[in-house]
Amino acid sequence: MMNPKRSSHIAPKTNARHNGKLKEILQSVTYKQKCEPKVEEPDVFNVPVIRQNENCNLLPKYTSVLAKSGEDGISMVDLDMLQQDLEKLLSTSAVRIRYLLAEIGEIDKNCESPEKKTQVKTTIKRKHIDEKPKFKDFKVTLPKNNSDKFWASIEPFCASVTKDDMSFLESLIQEYSRPIDCKIPDTDEHYSNSWSDDSISEDSNPAKKKNSATNGIRKNGLQSLVESFSISPTQKLLAQLLEERVPHYPRNGLNGIKMNQLKDVSKIKTTVSAQKYGTCLDRRLKKELLEQGILTVEDLTRSEPEDEVLSEIKKCRQELVAVNEFNLAELNRLKQATLNDLHCNELKLHLEKLDKHVLDLYNKIIVTRKTAQQEEGDDFDKDVFCEQMSKEYENEVDELITQQLELNRCADDLFSSTQRIY
Amino acid sequence: MPFTADAAAAQQVQERLKSVQQLVHEIEKKRAQCELGIAALQNYTQDEKGGHSSQKLKSLYKNVIAQTEQEEDVIRKALLKITEIRNIKNERRIQARIASNKESLRKGIWMKMLYSSAQTLPLYVGKIGEKPPPLCGAIPADPNYIAKVGDMVAALAKHATEGENWILAEVVCYNHSTSKYEVDDILKEQNQKGRHTLSRSRVIPLPLMRANPETDPQALFPQGTLVMALFPQTTCFYQALVNKPPSTHMDEYELLFEDPNYTEGYSPPHSVVQRYVIACKQKNKQAGQGTS
């Protein structure tokens, strides 16, 4: 194997190329380190270290560099040897770290068994302490039944709209849109009026006695009668009339007696039926005044007192009508929304069906492709078959997908319209 | 004196030399602390023999570890500075070579330089749990690694008279389009016929770092491995068996070269530095046989 080139390079071979001292030093270090594992027990006296008092022997260049003052510096010539010394230091410290770590591992191993026991004990204790409150917390924060109840209560509000809901709504609307037929009956005649009517009819069938009696009342008990009149304008009118006419009455004997008689009668009658006479007179007066053209119908109605009860009733009724109108409008809106929702639901169902169809088709395509590939035969045929199949399916898929899109669009529109309603 | 690249490099080197010196002083301080820590550890075990608490002992151990880590840190810094100095020097050498300033060195001096450059190759001392990087000791380069200009390689070069040989060479350049290296034989007189242009498979980059046997023995070729190594005092690689791997960072491989002149087929043990021992390619064997 030896070839000429090598021999041309070869100089006298010397094995002792090293500095003898250096080798010795190196060997001393290695010897020390190799001894370490043999020593039993954690041995702190064989920690690999180059002591500072060994610097001169083991690290000659390093020592000389240390001795040099800052001005002198290191020359390039020193560098090789210094590097070796530093490498020796580095290697020793790296080995030391490994040695110390191994020692610590040894200590841990020795102490492992007793430490483990104590650790286990403490962990058990801790577990007991920790678990209890945890369990309690769990019970408080997550009651299972309540959540179920809650969801059950929510459920009807979240369920989709059905036709039943729709019919219910429709019935409601029908009910509300019926006209309110609570007619307020016209105020019937006051009982006093019916009495006065009676008295008027009596007047029209004159009986002399009665007539005279009434006349007597008119002539003698006028003052008390005037007082008994309920309506102030009538009172005034009567009062004025009396002032004007009474003085003209001839105070003859007959009249005087009659007057006295009347007084007695009036004493009885005014207390019992003053009201009756009052209203009766009221009406007669009105009648008379209207006939004579002094007062018009309008004037009379104007002067009539307002019917408070009726107005109150009317007011309430108006309010009710307004509320009803509002409710009706709301119900109609709701109806629109539910109609939309119903339509939406239908669309969704349709979409789901379509989705299923698409998936089925996809599976079919895959299966056919696989079978086509597995089937033996000419490659060309296979490809053509695949193409045909895929074209057919593609058309179908296209159709389905366009339908899907359309439905989706409709659903979106409906949804947005429902949102607009509210 | 004009401010040349050389002068700039010289200044950079001087700066680094100074910082190395400072770092050496710092290392000494750290070492003192470490010794104190170790002394404390020893005292503790002496005082309380038999009845010492493991906790206390552990904390003392950890203390020493922390101190050692600090020491290690500073040493690494100092060594990094030295590597930087070497890189600056090497850069200048490559520049000079490009400028074809002929280094008229005698062969003997060359051999010495090759040896010392191998000895001063940076030492890789792995930290705990760290894997040695490629091109550290026996760890090969990544498959697509490309050697840098000025890097030392083993190159399978053709010779008109001597056939093919794995020679020690230096990368001149790498052509990415052709995937070929241009390399110079390390011996100038061999380059008279021009540079070698070789494909990547014919070029093996040499280690860029030495592995530390004390911390990273996995980055060394174990005993009995067939390797390629530079035969002492030559610039050619030959096959050899590892007789004994290095045991310290300054130690060398003990190799038995294949040599039919001996009855066993192997030479007596020769020492070869880590840098010039590389993994053996199966192909090479055939190539070597072909030429013999």
Image: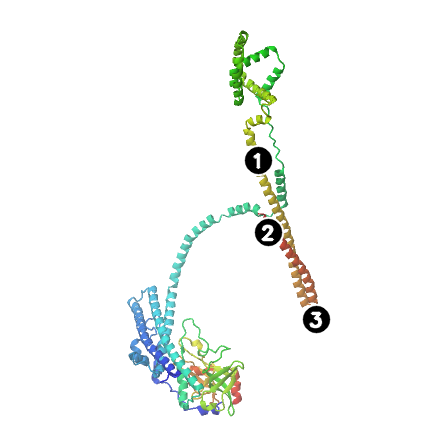
The amino acid beneath tag 2 is Ser
Give me the C-alpha separation between circle 1 and circle 2. Answer: 36 Å
The circle drawn on residue A318 is: 1
Q: How many marks?
A: 3
Question: In the rendering, at what x and y percent does residue B283 appear?
Answer: 53, 83
Label 3: which secondary element = helix
Q: Closest to the observer: A110 or A14?
A: A14
Give me the C-alpha separation between circle 3 and circle 2. Answer: 52 Å
Q: Label 2 marks which chain's residue?
A: A
Disc 3 + disc 1, Cβ < 8 Å: no
The amino acid beneath tag 1 is Gln
The amino acid beneath tag 3 is Phe
On the question of residue A273 being in view, the answer is yes
| Residue matched to label 2 | A416
The reply to the same-chain question for discs 3 and 1 is yes
Q: Quadrant of residue B107?
A: bottom left
Label 1: which secondary element = helix
Q: Earlier in the sequence, mark 1 or mark 2?
A: 1
Query: Which is in the foreground here, disc 3 or disc 2?
Result: 2
Question: In the rendering, at what x and y percent does residue B167 appear?
Answer: 47, 87
The circle drawn on residue B268 is: none
The circle drawn on residue A380 is: 3
Q: Quadrant of residue B251?
A: bottom left
Q: Closest to the observer: A178 or B186?
A: A178
The reply to the same-chain question for discs 3 and 2 is yes
Q: Label 3 marks which chain's residue?
A: A
